[in-house]
C-alpha cells in the first residue's frame, strides 16, 4: 500500500482548549491533548487546526478504522505502532501501549503511515 488515498474510519469530536497547530495525524488522548510514550491513545487528529482550535474548539479524532499517522522514524509494514514523545507513530516496544498496526512502511521521520487503529491498548 502506498501512502495515498482516503482514510477509512469513524471519527468523533473532542472538545479541547489546547492549541493544536501542526497536530494533524498525531495520536491524541480523550482530553484532546497529544498522546505520548506510555500513554493510551484514544484517537488520531484528522483536521488541520493550524492554531484555530484554541479556547474551546473541537478536534476531529479517528477512533476506528484506517487512519493516516505521521511517522517518527522508520517503521516496517505490519509493525505494531505506539505514540512517541511528540504523538507520532513509532514501532512499539515492551511496555508501550500499542495504538495500531502500520499497513505500509516508512523509511524515516515525518512520512505518512496508514495505520489500522487498535486504540486502547490491546496487544497484537
Image (cartoon, helix red, strand yellow):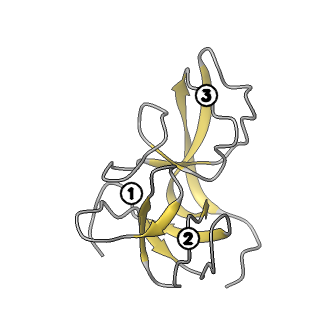
Q: Which residue is mark 2?
A: 73
Q: Position of residue 39 (x, y in %)?
A: 33, 48
Circle nearer the N terminus (3, 2): 3
Q: Which residue is mark 1?
A: 119
- Residue at 45% across / 51% down in the picture? 85
Q: Is residue 93 left or right of residue 90?
A: left
Q: Quadrant of the N terminus?
A: bottom right
Q: Which is more toward the observer, 1 or 87?
A: 87
Q: Position of residue 24 (x, y in %)?
A: 66, 47
- Callout 3 environment at 10 Å: few (<14), some (14 to 19), or many (20+)? some
Figure quadrant of residue 82: bottom left
Q: Which is more toward the observer, 91 or 55?
A: 91
How far is mark 3 from mark 1, CA to CA?
A: 20 Å
Up/down of 115 relative to 107, above or below: above
- Residue at 42% across / 41% down in the picture? 29
Q: Which residue is mark 3?
A: 58
Tag nearer the camera, 3 or 2: 2
Figure quadrant of residue 84: bottom left
Tag nearer the camera, 1 or 2: 2
In the current view of this chain or complex, which residue is farthest to the left? 95
Amino acid at each position: 500500500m502506498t501512502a495515498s488515498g482516503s482514510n477509512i474510519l469513524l471519527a468523533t469530536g473532542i472538545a479541547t482548549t489546547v492549541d493544536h497547530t501542526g497536530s494533524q495525524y498525531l495520536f491524541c488522548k480523550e482530553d484532546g491533548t497529544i498522546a505520548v510514550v506510555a500513554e493510551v491513545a484514544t484517537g488520531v487528529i484528522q483536521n488541520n487546526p493550524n492554531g484555530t482550535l484554541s479556547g474551546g474548539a473541537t478536534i476531529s479524532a479517528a477512533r476506528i478504522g484506517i487512519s493516516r499517522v505521521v511517522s517518527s522514524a522508520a517503521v516496517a509494514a505490519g509493525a505494531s505502532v505506539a505514540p512517541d514523545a511528540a504523538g507520532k507513530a513509532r514501532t512499539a516496544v515492551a511496555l508501550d501501549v500499542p495504538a495500531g498496526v502500520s499497513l505500509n512502511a516508512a523509511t524515516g521521520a515525518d512520512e505518512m503511515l496508514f495505520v489500522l487503529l487498535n486504540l486502547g491498548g490491546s496487544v497484537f
